[in-house]
Amino acid sequence: MNHRWNFDAVWANPEALLAGAIGTLRIFSICLVLGLSLGLLVGLGRYSKRKWIYLPASAFVEFFRNTPVLVQILWFYFALPMLLPFEISPLMAAAMGISLNSAAFSGEIFRGGIQSLERGQWEGAQALGMTQGQAMRRVILPQAIKRMLPALTNRAIEIFKMSTLASAVAYVELLQQGKLIASIHFNPIEAYTVIALLFFVFLYPLVQATYVLERRLRQGD
Amino acid sequence: MTLDRRAALNGIAAGTLALALPITARAQAGGTLDQIKQRGSLRIGVTQAPPWFSKDPKTGEWSSGFGISMGKAMASELGVKLETVEVTWGTSIAALQANKIDIMFMLDATPERAQAVDFPQSPLLYYSLAVLARDDLPVAQWSDLNKPSVRIAVPQASSMDKFVTENTPNATIQRFPGNAEAIAAFQAGRADAVCLFHPPLLVARKTLGTGRIVVPKPAKFQASSAALRKDDKPFRDFVDNTFATHYKSGQTQKWYEEFLASFGLDPKASPPVMKEML
Amino acid sequence: MYQWDFAPVLANSGMLAAGLVNTLKLTATALAFGVPLGLGLALLRLSRFRLLSLPAGFVVEFFRTTPPLVQLFWFFFALPILISVEMTPFVAAAITFSIQSSAFFAEVFRAGIVSIDRGQSEAARALGMSGAQAMRRVVLPQAVKRMIPAFMERSIELMKTTTLVATVSYADLLFQANELAQKTFRPLEVFTVTALIYFVVIYAASLVVHRVERRLATSGETTVH
């Protein structure tokens, strides 16, 4: 193999990698917040007994869980602007695609978490004189959150990895910067290896932390 | 939870979402020239394709390339800033239609494209279509490439894509989003040849260090242009005028040579972009 | 008012159909290699020998933690330079997704095997079976039954993940959609139709998964995720 290794060209561009890292973190935090908060509403909607809330929420979940995120991102970036009078930036398109997908998945997590609690909790809370709303807020939700935390942290890690899809619409994040460096210096091996390692080094400790969290929560029961 | 509570929550959610997406109202009034003046910027489409457009990894700015030089000149003539929007060759027309950009340089005027966009009369510059081929691949004519065993990389929906699809249909054609990926495919040995305009191949060959650049016969020396939104005569006339002026004065050739020199290529040894200089 | 025009899309539906076939081909191939590879990785991870379990663990963690698109770019543009082997886009994509899915399948296998009562393998051993025989004849068959829903869900995830190949030159459904959108200048109609095709195919697959899950649940099998 006659390859001249060229890692220097990658490290010689710290500004490029930093800009990429900032972009990744930015879209990650936007999608995490939007995805989880919308997901909470969707989850509550799926738990509702009223058809006109339950059905749209279910349709939402089924549609956004069963279409690939990349297709959604491209649709928001190329197709939607034909219908709307305002512009959709790469960040907006990618954030919408990833957030809606995450909302659908986390909606199911929230729904499962709430449903999994015994009726006894509801009745106990009501016996104490709480309204339905108070019971939900002070008793059910906190306990449900404890149970849903492992699945939600997994979702968060998935969202972080999905940030790379934004490179398909030229949003500046880590992979997009890797592609830029590779195309200018013709060192794809070094460039993509470094990008992969950056993701690994950042996510692996977090993944391990979620395992620890899972074990602690299970012990607490 | 009561009906009102639930409905209110859903309503709040929808409202919050709407606020979370910053809305940039597209300039509605007037043609492209009015919109440009109103906005204060000329938006050009860019894609990583030296010597036409190149991004500086350090600053993240699209700071060099022939297209950037032409764009800056146009912007300053209009008294506005230059704004760059990243697209691909294949999506640049959609970007024009969706009003993401005002002009896309280096797009050839083809009948299919002319159905969706307009082109100025005056040419932007002239170029030859060439390939960068593996050292051991015998190429002298386009027909040499017209075999299934030959894998050619091209950017999707570019003029190279169209030419190769029509003239070497038997080859195994691989279509990538842009110049960079097509060159990367060649570098990785996934393609035996990459077909681009001659100048980008010079730039690639210089850094790659391997491969032969060939202008296969019959040689295609033709004009490139820029795509504009349809039915906008004032802007089209402006662009037409600008291209003609800079071409005749030799400024076009000069910008091109400036980029080559900055990249370490000898302008004298490189193909010109003016047909009078051939 | 936007003028919808689906005619160009319908006229080129053959292109999209060909893309769909390629998507299914890639998914099936990645599954065919990913499942056995995943089993191998899981067994290695469960091994008592650290020399086997640690590298296997690293491979699984690495491919689960790095984004699939980064992996795809690496296998597409970097690997061929390293090993100077000619790979068609299909082969490169198949390798990427086989390894990527095998990492996830390895975890499903491991969870399934571990969930089988230790008593089972001890009883098998008492009957005179070796460790490997106990695994093959007693533990694995039961574990596999439990893991079927998780497998099917993972497979559906895989089908969605294959859309990433549209950014390199493999002509799957999304790639064909890009081609068509760039040819007809009708991105709205093209991408809407494409999204619907994906939804119909994947939704149908997920309905099958739900039925299988319910059958297994009623037959008294517990399942792992």
Image: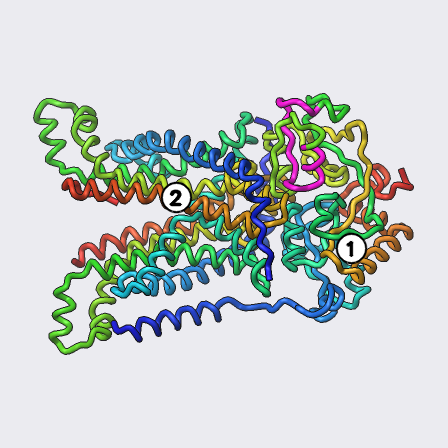
Q: Position of residue B214 (x, y in %)?
A: 76, 29
- Badge 1 sits on which subunit? B
- Badge 2 sits on which subunit? C
Q: Is residue C51 visible?
A: no
The C terminus of chain C: image quadrant: top left
Segment tinted magenta in the rendering: B145-165
- Residue at left 83%, top 51%? B121
The dot on residue C202 is 2
Q: Position of residue A154 (x, y in %)?
A: 34, 52
Choose top left, top right, bottom left or bottom right for residue B171: top right
In-front residue for pair B205/C115 = C115
Task: Residue under label 1, please give it.
Answer: B69
Q: Secondary structure at mark 1?
A: helix
Q: What amino acid does circle 1 point to?
A: Ser
Q: Position of residue C92 (x, y in %)?
A: 50, 32
What is the C-alpha distance between the residues marked 2 and 1?
A: 48 Å
